């Protein structure tokens, strides 16, 4: 591994776990430009799942070219034993340590996943019921990659791999019936193929090919071809080399003609003593020209001397962790984004705390000011590891509006929220004074809901919506939910849960105003097993039943929900 690539792989910060880092554009936390292209979303097994979001991601801290160009990769979950790093397809990373079959995620707070090892296979159970299995090729391999992903019903997609430059890369993704996607790489040395991938490669009618044009190890173009082989769309990229890391995108053009242009400060953020590099680059300006005769928008960025690597906090760099996780004292860093469009200037200043949580955002347009102040469920004086599970969740958000020429005329909106340790919202107070109160079923199961297959609390039991004190004439509304288990298609998994009924109550009455029940396809041999087969609404002494019929015709799933019977029952 090159020195720059190695340095990039060693850079860690909790700031990378926030969604703004993994979206296309400039992250105001880090000053990095990252590009994640959502090219398609494959819904396997005749649209019954699981889904595979096809996301091609660029990371300027990664210099290796594994077939898609330096810095580019398909986002998948993985575990690397040499660095004890578990990376999820969502972009979130954890430091993971094993003790037999048990796995400890050192920097995980919310209980949103369960992870364990079963016969050298890493099993990741997500709160929504999705299960990922990560495997390695042999006992000498230090990287575990997805071998199967299961939907909540137990359907699966499987992954086939080969090696390029000593690293495993995915070759095919298949469901129980067909090949969903096939990959070809620059290192294949096959004159009849081009690097890229093909969706639905076995179907002449549905297949769609993406071709990658790679020069000097840099991805220059992505071309999307129609099933007839003609170009439908393309993306174009240009770069500049970074002295301390991977390539930096300086130019991107989208299929609709929009052009993004970026300018960098190579010696941007300073790093603490002992870090693998002294500086990392930051974006100075980002210009977006939409095309179609629309005027471009330019954003200019300034950053504080303190930053998301903890520079100036007095810590010495240590590999494998965020330096700021050790801090129990106040530490903040900030950025300012100034944009100009059609002569109108807009300035936004954001301030972040030591946990990389935005605590304030002030936007100024002329004399008009919007100020957002955010408090979290963190505890003063405690470091990351001693904080409660929900400390990264917003506790109170205050948004104020005023004119700088008359600052005493202030209007504010306040929202407060509480959570459980699983990240579920328990109570929300809206700015207008209304309240929303949620109750969830126990993970071990109770009347109305069997045990959660993931072992995590996620199934809503009831939701109460209480009016604001100024609107007492409005009635309290309550929704109640019941679930039932169906046999899972996955081995070693007993059931998955589906909604059995939901009920709407108003004004404190004991009988529901509206009750809806659901029936499902219950034959495991049916391709649409687990999908809704009927929905019946009961209201005012009458019931209406909507029946759903599914059929598969040449890999096209047809649903006919309009075949319904209306049955009136009067008491």
Image: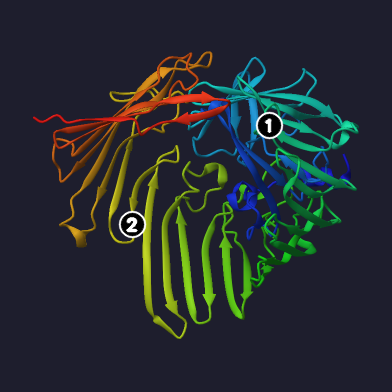
- The image shows residue 105 at horizontal and vertical percentages of 59, 33
330 up-or-down from 449: above or below: below
Instruction: Tell me: 524 left or right of 434.
Output: right
Q: Which residue is mark 1?
A: 78
Element on which disc 1 rests: strand
The total number of labels drawn is 2
- Residue 297: percent from left, percent from top: 65, 70
Q: Is residue 146 visible?
A: no
The quarter of the picture where the N terminus appears is: top right
Q: Mark 1 and 2 residues: CB-CB less than 8 Å, in contact?
A: no
Task: Name the outermost residue toward the front.
Answer: 228
Give the colouring mode of the picture: rainbow
Identity of the residue furthest to the left in this view = 571
Left of 470 or right of it: where is 247?
right
- What residue sits 86% from the left and 56% below the top? 241
> Which callout, 1 or 2, points at the residue further toward the start of the chain?
1
On the image, the x and y values in percent for residue 40 come to 63, 41
Question: Looking at the image, is 407 positioned above or below residue 454?
Answer: below
Q: CA distance from mark 1 to mark 2?
A: 39 Å
Which quarter shows the C terminus?
top left
Name the quadrant containing residue 566.
top left
Residue that badge 2 annotates: 430
């Amino acid at each position: 591994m090159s020195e720059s690539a190695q340095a990039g792989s060693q850079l860690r910060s909790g700031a990378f776990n926030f969604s703004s880092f993994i979206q296309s554009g400039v992250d105001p936390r880090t000053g990095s430009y990252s590009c994640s292209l959502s090219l398609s979303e494959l819904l396997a097994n005749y649209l019954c799942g699981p889904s595979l979001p096809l996301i091609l991601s660029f990371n300027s801290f990664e210099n290796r070219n594994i077939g898609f160009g330096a810095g580019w990769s398909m986002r998948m979950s993985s575990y690397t034993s040499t660095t004890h790093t578990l990376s999820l397809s969502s972009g979130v990373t954890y430091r993971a340590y094993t003790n037999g079959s048990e796995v400890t995620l050192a920097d995980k707070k919310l209980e949103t996943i369960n992870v364990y090892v079963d016969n050298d296979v890493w099993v990741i159970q997500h709160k929504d019921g999705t299960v990922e299995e990560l495997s390695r090729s042999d006992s000498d391999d230090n990287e575990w990659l997805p071998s199967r992903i299961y939907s909540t019903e137990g359907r699966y997609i499987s992954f086939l791999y080969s090696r390029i430059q000593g690293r495993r890369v995915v070759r095919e993704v298949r469901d129980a019936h067909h090949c969903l996607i096939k990959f070809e790489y620059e290192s294949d040395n096959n004159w009849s193929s081009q690097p890229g991938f093909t969706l639905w490669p076995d179907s002449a009618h549905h297949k769609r090919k993406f071709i990658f044009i790679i020069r000097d190890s840099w991805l220059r173009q992505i071309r999307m071809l129609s099933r007839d082989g003609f170009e439908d769309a393309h993306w174009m990229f240009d770069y500049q080399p970074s002295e301390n890391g991977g390539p930096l995108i300086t130019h991107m053009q989208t299929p609709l003609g929009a052009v993004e242009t970026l300018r960098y400060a190579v010696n941007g953020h300073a790093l603490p003593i002992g870090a693998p590099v002294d500086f990392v680059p930051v974006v100075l300006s980002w210009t977006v020209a939409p095309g179609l005769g629309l005027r471009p928008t330019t954003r200019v960025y300034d950053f504080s001397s303190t930053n998301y690597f903890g520079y100036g906090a007095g810590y010495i760099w240590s590999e494998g962790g965020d330096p700021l996780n050790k801090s129990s004292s106040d530490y903040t860093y900030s950025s300012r984004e100034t944009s100009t469009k059609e002569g109108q200037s807009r300035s936004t200043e954001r301030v972040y705390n030591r946990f990389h949580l935005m605590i304030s955002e002030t936007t100024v347009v002329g004399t008009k000011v919007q100020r957002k102040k955010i408090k979290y469920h963190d505890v003063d004086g405690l470091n990351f590891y001693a904080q409660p599970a929900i400390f990264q969740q917003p506790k109170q958000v205050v948004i104020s509006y005023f004119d700088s020429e008359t600052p005493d005329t202030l209007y504010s909106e306040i929202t407060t929220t509480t959570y459980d340790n699983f990240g579920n919202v328990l109570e929300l107070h809206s700015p207008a004074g209304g309240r929303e109160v949620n109750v969830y079923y126990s993970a071990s199961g109770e009347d109305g809901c069997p045990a959660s297959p993931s072992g995590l609390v996620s199934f809503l039991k009831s939701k109460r919506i209480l009016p604001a004190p100024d609107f007492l004439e409005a009635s309290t509304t309550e929704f109640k939910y019941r679930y039932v288990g169906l046999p899972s298609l996955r081995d070693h998994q007993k059931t998955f849960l589906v909604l059995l009924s939901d009920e709407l109550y108003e004004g404190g009455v004991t009988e529901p105003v509206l009750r809806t029940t659901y029936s499902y396809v219950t034959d495991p041999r049916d391709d649409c097993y687990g999908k809704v087969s009927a929905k019946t609404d009961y209201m005012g002494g009458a019931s209406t039943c909507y029946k759903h019929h599914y059929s598969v015709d040449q890999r096209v799933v047809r649903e006919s929900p309009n075949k319904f019977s209306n049955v009136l029952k009067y008491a």
